Image: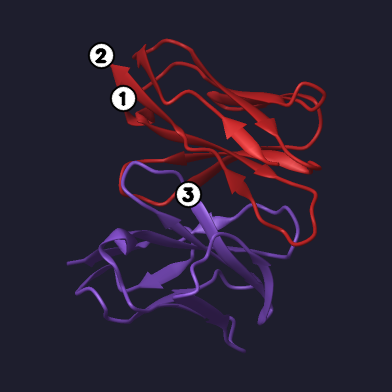
Amino acid sequence: DSGVTQTPKHLITATGQRVTLRCSPRSGDLSVYWYQQSLDQGLQFLIQYYNGEERAKGNILERFSAQQFPDLHSELNLSSLELGDSALYFCASSVGVGEETQYFGPGTRLLVL
Amino acid sequence: GQNIDQPTEMTATEGAIVQINCTYQTSGFNGLFWYQQHAGEAPTFLSYNVLDGLEEKGRFSSFLSRSKGYSYLLLKELQMKDSASYLCAVSPNTGGFKTIFGAGTRLFVKA
């Protein structure tokens, strides 16, 4: 158990819908990262927040957005969902903003029908 | 640009030793991570190399050569439970921190 929690574990929805994925980092960690992993694909970095502020951005679609709240939990919002958005979405956290080890949550498996 | 290459799949026998290679090209470099990921599960941290050389941690060792842009993960005394994907990830020295992950090497350990 990494100490990072994600909800929900599974999500099934339809094309065009909007969903929100939630992540709580390890106690004491200030950075939260979001990744997308499609079937048999590598981890694609989406976005990083550090202490409430956006720190780095990867290949995140405009239909996707995220935020980190004062209590440091984070939410990833996915809208106008397409079939291709079906994937595992991982959240990870680390202590600071540098090259520390990232601890991954169990992931949310999203299926868009 | 930034690029990470590692073999797609490898097969080894229980009790043997296997070496998983990773080459990278990044604009600036801080360090290199290795993560293990079982199918459908979260990646878990194995090692982090900043300096050249070999770091040993039990059955797993990781090597880095910064000048060659090369790393390897060495797994000894393979066990069936070591069947997993092994992800090489680079921490580039660019504005804004974003770890770049390779596609991973799927290791199959057979009896």
Check the image and report above or below for B17 versus A103: above
Looking at the image, can residue B111 be seen?
yes
Q: Are marks 1 and 2 in contact (CB under 8 Å)?
A: yes
**Which of the 4 quarters of the picture holds residue A93?**
bottom right
Q: Nearer the viewer, mark 1 or mark 3?
A: 3
Instruction: Name the image quarter holding the C terminus of chain A.
Output: bottom left
Separation (CA) of disc 1 from disc 2: 7 Å
- Chain letter belonging to callout 2: B
- Chain letter belonging to callout 1: B
Display colour for chain A: purple
Label 3 is placed on what type of residue?
A: Leu
Where residue B13 appears, x then y in whole percent?
Answer: 34, 11
Instruction: Name the image quarter holding the N terminus of chain A.
Output: bottom left
Check the image and report above or below for B16 versus B26: above
Q: Which residue is the site of mark 3?
A: A43
Query: Same chain for the residues at labels 1 and 2, yes or no?
Result: yes
Q: Nearer the viewer, mark 3 or mark 2?
A: 3
Task: Pick the residue in front: A46 or A81.
Answer: A81
Q: Which chain is red?
A: B
Separation (CA) of disc 3 from disc 2: 29 Å
Classify mark 2: residues with Cα within 10 Å, few (<14), some (14-19) or many (20+): few
Q: On the picture, is B101 further left or further right than B83?
A: right
Q: Residue at x 19, y 74 (%)?
A: A14
Label 1 is placed on what type of residue?
A: Met
Q: Which residue is the site of mark 2?
A: B111
Q: Are marks 1 and 3 in contact (CB under 8 Å)?
A: no
Kindly identify which numbered label has been placed on residue B80: 1
